[in-house]
Amino acid sequence: MYRLLSLTLVLLFATTAAEAAPPPPSSATPELVAAAKKEGTVVFYTSIELQTAEKIGKAFEAKYPGIAVQVERNGAERIFQRLAQERASGIHAADVVEASDMTALLHWKAEGWLQPFVPADVAAKWPADQRDPDGCFATERFTLSPILYNTRLVKPEDAPKSFADLLLPKWDGKIVKAHPGYSGTIMTVTFEISRDLGWEFFQKLGRQHIMQVQSAADPPKKVAQGERPVAADGGEYLPLQMIAQGAPLAIVYPAEGTPSIPGGAGLMVDAPHPNAARLFVLYLFSREGQQLLVDMGRIRSFHPDVSSPQGARPLSEIKIMKADPAAQEKLTATIKKKYAEYFGL
């Protein structure tokens, strides 16, 4: 079913499979664990929602006592900027980098910032179109971006069923959405919707007096709090978490298709804690780490031995907009410019 999210290898990565020369697959050996414990720390730059990212860190620390995980969480666009600024200043603080905007991984690879490193699980189990042929990164998670509504404020029969419904007069001043200039998730969402529905959709949506927030994690919270009855976007995984905890949220997978957002992770070429970094990457892509992402974070995984998130609709029942990071990368500046124009930012 994951073929619904298939990415063309030639488009996604900078080299062809024939040119690729990934290193041999790696596993968590006793020697690596011992070396990682001597370093004692791993610094994780990530755009995963903070509570979920911290849970991953705590689980790793419990499995490998003596190694602390320093989670540096921000929106993918902010991580992209921070890493560029740090490296321009000669600062090499990050060990492992992760982003919901796959174009960031493409850029970091092109800059030579990522160390080729292939976890055994990725080599044996990952779809070929979800891993870099040179072994610099792989898709360690993906989510969708549905429409949300507050079940206390909106009846199911009155809720929007499509993106087109968001343009109806009755939703004027009642919608919240996140910003592609901050969130990598929303950058990907904006690219896919503008490609499939045209920029005219965003022109019209910009006239609906939108509540503009930053992170993809913000719209579900605003809707659950009743500040707006409907969210136009936001990652699927946080609403699933909130619904499980009793939040008055309902998910709508739009009739036109639901945007899909792959997130990738890689090892920094000059990681200050290289052994701890390798061990953390191995854990992140392991069945245990991936199931943790699914169970704790309600994030979807490409690992074939991992179950689907509890409460999530099967992919086979959802029409999905496909990601295309290479095409998206070329349009990033255009997306930011047009979005700012249409939403008056």
Image: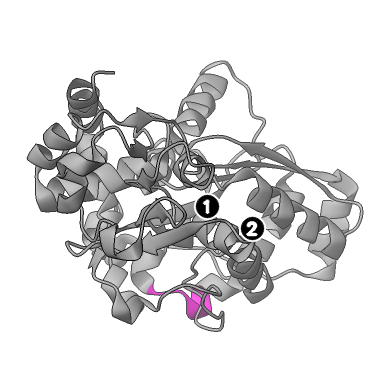
Pointer 1 with pointer 2, Cβ within 8 A: yes
Q: Which mark is residue 239?
A: none
Q: Return the x and y of residue 37 as percentages of the image width and height.
A: 88, 53
* Colour approach in the figure: one colour
Label 2 environment density (alpha carbons within 10 Å; few <14, some 14–19, many ≥20): many
Residue 133 in view: no
What residue is at 64 percent from the left and 43 percent from the top?
50
User: Where is the C terminus found, in terms of image quarters?
Assistant: top left
Q: Which mark is residue 265?
A: 1
Q: Which three-letter amino acid code belongs to the residue tagged 2?
A: Val
Residue extending furthest toward the top: 89
Q: Report the magenta residues as a range.
A: 123-127
User: Where is the N terminus found, in terms of image quarters?
Assistant: bottom left
What residue is at 40 percent from the left and 62 percent from the top?
251
Q: Is residue 182 magenta?
A: no
The one of 165 and 122 positioned closer to us in this rendering: 165
What residue is at 42 percent from the left and 64 percent from the top?
131
Determine the secondary structure under disc 1. strand
Give the quarter of the image for residue 341: top left
In the visual, does 292 lie left or right of 75? Answer: right
- In the depicted structure, whether residue 117 falls above or below residue 342: below
Q: Return the x and y of residue 210 as percentages of the image width and height.
A: 30, 31
Q: Which mark is residue 281?
A: 2
Q: Earlier in the sequence, mark 1 or mark 2?
A: 1
Q: Return the x and y of residue 304 as percentages of the image width and height.
A: 49, 82
